[in-house]
Image (cartoon, rainbow, N blue to C red):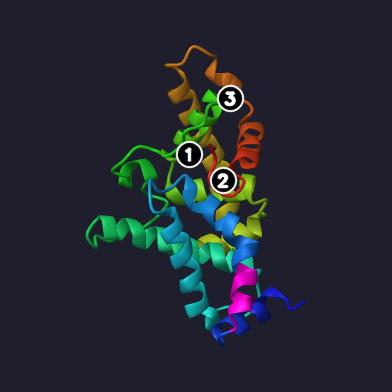
Amino acid sequence: MADESELLAAWKDGDLAAGEALFSAHVDRVSRFFYNKVSEGIDDLVQQTFLACVESADRFRGDSSFRTFLLGVARNMLRRHYEKLGRGKQIGDLDAVTIHDLSTTPSMAAERNRHHRVLLESLRRIPIDSQIALELYYWEDLNAREIAEVLEVPLGTVKTRLRRAKELLRAQVVKMGTAAPTDPTRTADNLEGWARSIKAQLGTGEPR
């Protein structure tokens, strides 16, 4: 079977079967990427991401994995999505604004588990690139080098950002949990466990 760089090249040359193979292999991952960041239109963003990916296939040299290239495209599509909602207003640094700041509608999260609900909403209230870094780390099992490729920052920067992101998330979880009857520190002290348990529910990117 052809590797993914060969499949991408074939798709660009018009091989629809190659495109379908890449789409089937990664559609869940791209759906998960957008799930906790936009309130509607996930399917359209997923389709646009794959279309942008094949249109920019010449930029993929195979030095990194196809999934990091694809997720980098998804990050750019997320930026464009919110710039479009803001009528063309440039967002700038994605580590200086949160999804909670940009979104005009509530989170889609409908988790029955209160801890999951708190965690998903807390993620939306930390800087976008920090949210992306943590979700890629916990949900996609990307390492620091791969996350650095998606965020287009040096490896040292992403390591620092991951540590800071965990601190910001923990503080936000405690803040959001104080209004609930259960002890918020129970969730805050086990962020990794809760975050990884959500992935099992995300599945196809459409958790219920």
Q: Residue at x 66, y 68 (%)?
A: 65
Measured in 3D between alpha carbons, the distance from the residue under mark 1 to the one under mark 3, in whole angstroms, is 13 Å
Most extreme residue toward the right is 1
Residue 123 bears which disc, if any? 1
In the image, is residue 19 part of the stretch drawn in magenta? yes
Position of 117 relative to 59 (above/below): above
Looking at the image, tell me whether mark 1 or mark 3 is earlier in sequence order: 1
Measured in 3D between alpha carbons, the distance from the residue under mark 2 to the one under mark 3, in whole angstroms, is 16 Å
The reply to whether the C-beta atoms of the residues labelled 1 and 2 are less than 8 Å apart is: yes
The reply to whether the C-beta atoms of the residues labelled 1 and 3 are less than 8 Å apart is: no
Image coordinates for residue 132, horizontal then vertical, percent: 51, 50
Query: Helix, strand or loop at disc 2?
Result: helix
Q: Nearer the viewer, residue 43 or 79?
A: 43
Left or right? Give the position of 134 relative to 176. right
Q: Quadrant of residue 80?
A: bottom left
Residue wearing tag 3: 187
| Kind of residue sitting beneath label 1 | Leu
In the image, is residue 102 part of the stretch drawn in magenta? no
Position of 120 relative to 132 (above/below): above
Count residues near mark 1 (Cα–Cα under 10 Å), then give few for <14, some for 14-19, many for 20+.
many
Left or right? Give the position of 52 relative to 19. left
Q: Residue at x 49, y 24 (%)?
A: 174
Q: Find the magenta span and give its range.
A: 15-22
Q: Residue at x 57, y 60 (%)?
A: 27
Q: Residue at x 59, y 66 (%)?
A: 23
